[in-house]
Image (spheres, rainbow, N blue to C red):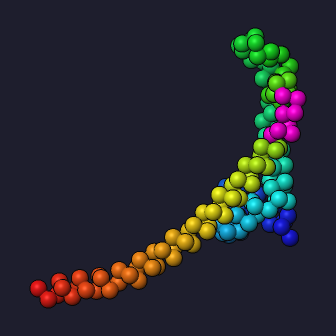
């Protein structure tokens, strides 16, 4: 059940789909999905897949314009350049993406909780200020 919800959130996040698609999920729904380890895996894999498209960009034609210490070769892609710098680059990309999704889930969950607390505080302030506002109105009418 959680995996389809995560996939639905990915689709809904697309601006074109968001304009014509189903209603956006609530902040609470997003926080729950982003906090779910299975959803984090799916989202991190999607991020890595999207990054892969960019990483396959050929940068070799710019090799002559780069610093020789960068070791950019004529047939290089961004992926090959990064792989030489860090042989575990793709694993690190996935792990970093997963951590970022987990952090987003924690932040979203905290924001949802805080928003509810701020609403309670505002309600208490309105209740406490009501009699003061009424008394001030009485004083104005008495003058």
Name, please, the residue furthest toward the left: 143
Q: Quadrant of residue 29?
A: bottom right
| Picture layout, residue 100 above or below residue 74 | below
Query: 63 or 129: which is nearer to us?
Result: 129
Q: Nearer the viewer, residue 133 or 65?
A: 133
Task: Tell me where residue 121 appears, x and y as whole percent.
Answer: 48, 74
Judged left or right of residue 90, residue 9 is: left
Q: Position of residue 53 (x, y in %)?
A: 81, 38
In the rendered view of the protein, which quadrant contains the C terminus? bottom left
Q: Quadrant of residue 108?
A: bottom right
Compared to residue 1, the image places residue 124 above or below, namely below
Q: Residue at x 35, y 80 (%)?
A: 129
Q: Is residue 89 magenta?
A: yes
Question: Which image quarter is the N terminus in?
Answer: bottom right
Q: Main secondary structure of the magenta part?
A: helix
Residue at 80% over, 66% down: 5
Magenta stretch contains residue 11: no
Instruction: Provide residue 96's location: percent of width, then percent of height.
Output: 77, 43
Up/down of 96 relative to 35, above or below:
above
Which residues lie in the magenta part?
86-93
Q: Is residue 24 visible?
A: no
The residue lying at 71 percent from left, 59 percent from top is 105
Q: Position of residue 133 (x, y in %)?
A: 29, 82
């Amino acid at each position: 059940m959680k995996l389809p919800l995560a996939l639905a959130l990915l689709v809904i996040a697309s601006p074109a789909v968001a304009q014509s698609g189903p209603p956006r999920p609530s902040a609470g729904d997003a926080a729950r999905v982003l906090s779910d380890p299975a959803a984090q895996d799916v989202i991190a894999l999607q991020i890595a897949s999207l990054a892969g498209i960019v990483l396959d960009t050929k940068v070799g034609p710019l090799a002559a314009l780069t610093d020789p210490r960068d070791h950019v070769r004529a047939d290089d892609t961004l992926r090959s350049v990064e792989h030489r710098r860090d042989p575990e680059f793709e694993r690190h990309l996935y792990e970093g993406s997963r951590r970022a999704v987990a952090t987003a889930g924690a932040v979203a969950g905290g924001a949802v909780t805080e928003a509810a607390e701020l609403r309670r505080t505002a309600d208490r302030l309105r209740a406490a200020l009501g009699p003061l506002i009424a008394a001030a109105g009485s004083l104005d009418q008495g003058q």
